[in-house]
Image (tube, helix red, strand yellow):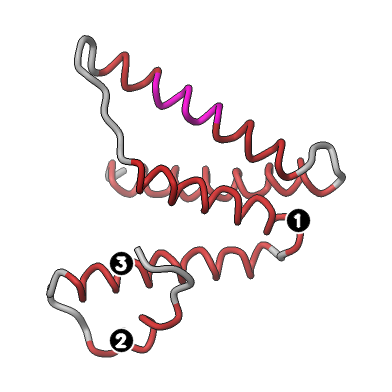
Amino acid sequence: MNPVVAATAFALLAFAANSVLCRMALRDAHIDAASFVSIRLIAGALTLWLLIRIGRRGQRLGGDWRSALALLAYAIAFTFAYVGLTAGTGALLLFGAVAGGDDRRRVRRRRAHRPYRYPGLGCSPWPD
């Protein structure tokens, strides 16, 4: 099997599993949304720190606060959305936001853009 296809399939399955597990945790009030997002962000930050430390021994670690704040906003919004939105609506919003952000980035950098995608530019929920 093509490694790109395998990695893509794995990523799609992982995202779907993440959504299902998040909904299961929040559905029956096993944990509140604020605690849940805190645990997710702390666990993710520790995992990322460990992976970077293993891969880049002795190198100085850097970061980007704008990206970190965007991730925080995403995590908070979607964790609370898991409680009130259906999976289909949440996926539609997420994919629309990603596509809209990509479209805005292309327009801003004056890269080739297909005209049929312009109507979607105004539909993305946040600028990137």
Tag 2: amino acid: Tyr
Instruction: Decide which of tag 1 and tag 2 comes sooner along the chain.
Output: 1
Tag 1: amino acid: Val
Badge 1 crowding class, 10 Å Cα cut-off, few under 14, some 14 to 19, many 20 or more, is some
Residue 51 relative to residue 42: left or right: left
Judge whether 38 appears above or below 80 on screen: above
Q: Residue at x 44, y 74 (%)?
A: 124
Q: Residue at x 31, y 84 (%)?
A: 117
Residue 54 relative to residue 80: left or right: left
In three-dimensional space, the C-alpha distance between marks 1 and 3, rounded to whole angstroms, equals 27 Å
Q: Are marks 1 and 3 in contact (CB under 8 Å)?
A: no
Quadrant for residue 97, please give it: bottom left
Q: In the displayed orientation, state which residue is furthest to the front.
A: 65
Query: Residue 73: x, y in percent?
Result: 52, 52
Residue 46 relative to residue 66: left or right: right
Query: Residue 13: x, y in percent?
Result: 52, 46
- Residue beneath disc 3: 102
SS at mark 2? helix
In three-dimensional space, the C-alpha distance between marks 3 and 2, rounded to whole angstroms, equals 11 Å
Judge whether 74 appears above or below 68 on screen: below
Is-magenta flag for residue 28? Answer: no
Query: Residue 109: x, y in percent?
Result: 15, 69
- Residue beneath disc 1: 83
